[in-house]
Image (cartoon, grey):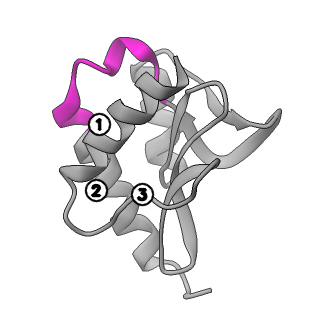
Amino acid sequence: MWKEQLKFYDGLIDQCPNFECKGKKMIYTSANGYMFSLLNKVGEIGIRLPKTIGQQFMKDYNTGPYKSYGAVMKDYVLIPSNLYTNTKLLIDCLNESYTYVMTLPTK
């Protein structure tokens, strides 16, 4: 399961020219000193979004906050598996997340 999810996640990231996957066991994307997407150990994808956009995303797609290693990740939303067929939406969310972290103060 995890390897299939990693392949799917990598495929999404490959379609985003501004960033790439990082990490070996904890797979993530980051920019400007901030992580903004993550594949957890159970194969769930989380994307960091601005608070209001994240709240609307959770409402629109009937999902909740993202957890990694049992902890809720602040400003991350869980990408439900029923959205995996909508790669355009997921790529748009990843790019929006990248744009968001680029507006934050550099770490």
Asked if the magenta segment contains residue 81, the reply would be: yes
Please identify the residue farthest to the right as the structure is shown: 70
Query: Considering depth in this image, is 11 or 73 the residue closer to the camera?
Result: 11
Amino acid on which the number 3 mark rests in the picture: Cys
Task: Say which of marks 2 and 3 sits in front.
Answer: 3
Is residue 12 placed above or below 18 in the rendered structure? Answer: above
Question: Which comes sooner in the sequence, label 2 or label 3?
Answer: 3
Task: Say which of marks 1 and 3 sits in front.
Answer: 3
The 10 Å Cα crowd at callout 3, few under 14, some 14 to 19, many 20 or more, is some
Residue at 16 percent of width and 35 percent of height: 88
Region rendered in magenta: 79-90
What kind of element bears circle 2? helix
Is residue 77 placed above or below 82 in the rendered structure? Answer: below
What kind of element bears circle 3? loop
Give the x, y percent position of residue 70. Answer: 83, 33
Asked if the magenta segment contains residue 7, the reply would be: no
How many marks the image carries: the answer is 3
Question: Which comes sooner in the sequence, label 1 or label 3?
Answer: 3
Residue 41 image label: none
Query: Considering depth in this image, is 59 or 64 the residue closer to the camera?
Result: 64
Location of mark 1 (residue): 90
Amino acid on which the number 2 mark rests in the picture: Asn
Quarter of the image with the C terminus is bottom right
Location of mark 2 (residue): 95
Residue at 39 percent of width and 21 percent of height: 60
Give the x, y percent position of residue 84. Answer: 31, 21
